[in-house]
Image: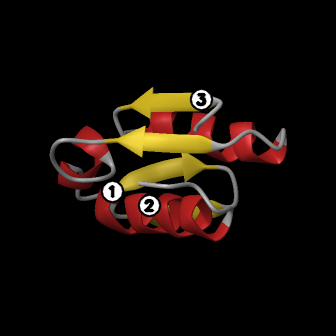
Amino acid sequence: MYDIIIIGAGPAGLTAAIYARRAEKRVLIIEKESFGGQMTLSPKIENYPGFLQMSGNDFADKLIEQVLEQGVTV
């Protein structure tokens, strides 16, 4: 049983999952394709706080790692 089910694992869905887990909710993410959404196709993301630049794929990997570490079911 889950408190929150998130459909889509783009940046918004992954961020929502992180905050929901911080609020001690049981969270499930459902994604039909790849985690990270459209940003995985971006060769360069700039001006994100804490990072000068990185690829969209690297950014998605960091978000997914944090989501899994928080205990979210995917």
Is residue 53 shown left or right of residue 51?
left
- SS type, badge 3: strand
Q: Residue furthest right?
A: 23
Q: Amino acid at mark 2?
A: Phe
Which comes sooner in the sequence, label 2 or label 3? 3
Q: The N terminus is located in which quarter? A: top right
Q: Which mark is residue 56?
A: 1
Residue at the location (66% across, 47% down)? 18
x and y percentages locating residue 36 in the rendered image: 33, 49
Name the front one of labels 2 and 3: 3
Between the C-alphas of marks 2 and 3, the distance is 24 Å
Q: Which mark is residue 59?
A: 2
Q: Amino acid at mark 1?
A: Gly
Residue at the location (74% across, 39% down)? 25
x and y percentages locating residue 34 in the rendered image: 21, 53
How many marks the image carries: the answer is: 3
Q: Quadrant of residue 74?
A: bottom left
For disc 3, the neighbor class at 10 Å (few under 14, some 14 to 19, many from 20) is some
Circles 1 and 2 in contact, beta carbons < 8 Å: yes
x and y percentages locating residue 51 in the rendered image: 60, 63
- SS type, badge 2: helix
- SS type, badge 1: helix
Q: Which mark is residue 4?
A: 3
